[in-house]
Image (spheres, rainbow, N blue to C red):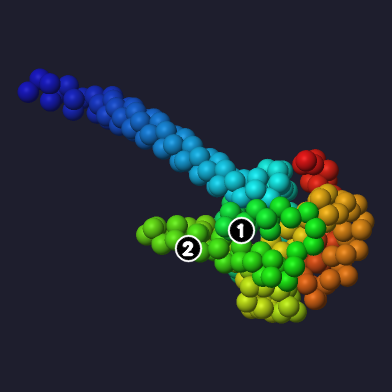
Amino acid sequence: RDLFAQIARNTLLTWSLVVLAGVLLWVLLFMIFLRAYRRQQRTNNELVETQDVTIFALAYQAELRDRQTGKHLERTAAYARLLGEEVSRLPSFRSYVGRDYLLDLVKSAPLHDIGKVGISDSILLKPGKLTAEEWKEMERHCELGARVLRIAEAKLKFRSFLDIATQLTLYHHEKWDGTGYPHGLAGDAIPISGRIMALADNYDALRTARPYKGAFCHEECRGIITGLRGTHFDPALVDAFVRREQDFRRISEELTD
């Protein structure tokens, strides 16, 4: 009875102690959950980095057979990011090319030529011009790569970046006017990822020396690409390239082989 009487006389103190205990408990729980969240974030980041490195290693395997370097993969991914960022501001692209799409696009870009692992060295490493029959065999690398990625995607129970990876792998040699391969798609029928990868890959091919040709300077590449606006390349992407051409030049110089 005396205890309850004291509590009744010190109502303010009693409630202050209750509130203080509640605050301390809340802070304790918050710190516990914050530590768990940070630990989970660190684990997630490590998984993403591991995934990215694995993708790069798989893609680099194909590039090694073609006597390319890892810098080609880095450059083309960077070019794809520039083009994707630029067209994401356009009304005709905005609803499709969002933040998640750009992340998947950049992650997928290194895989665009993974199908070359299925092409024989006699064709892949031939220093001279390919015959018509050899070109037909070379063109299979798009479908071979897409087949590998589809098999991988089928193992998953959720949508992943492999959807975009399959698109750009299969369609990055299609042309805006329908004269490309493997399916001769034209215009908007070509997935955006394939159109973006086509320009990114061609710019890098022009800027890079090969056994059968020298490297073109940026101005020459600009002239070739703008000259193919509306035939090889999506006009909107060529315009985006022109707007970001200095960034293209910078990347090609910073990530040189």
Residue 46 placement, left or right of 23: right
Q: Secondary structure at mark 1?
A: loop
Residue 192 x/y as whole percent: 65, 68
Residue 16 placement, left or right of 248: left
Residue 138 placement, left or right of 44: right
The quadrant of the picture occupied by the C terminus is top right
187, above or below 222, in the image: below
Give the alpha-carbon distance from disc 2 to disc 1, as whole Å: 19 Å
The quadrant in which residue 38 appears is: top left
* Residue named by callout 1: 119
- Total marks drawn? 2
Q: Secondary structure at mark 2?
A: helix
55, above or below 118, in the image: above
Residue beneath the point at 65% across and 53% down: 121
Q: Earlier in the sequence, mark 2 or mark 1?
A: 1
Q: Nearer the viewer, residue 29 or 144?
A: 144
Question: What amino acid is found at the position of numbered circle 1 in the picture?
Answer: Ile
* Residue named by callout 2: 150
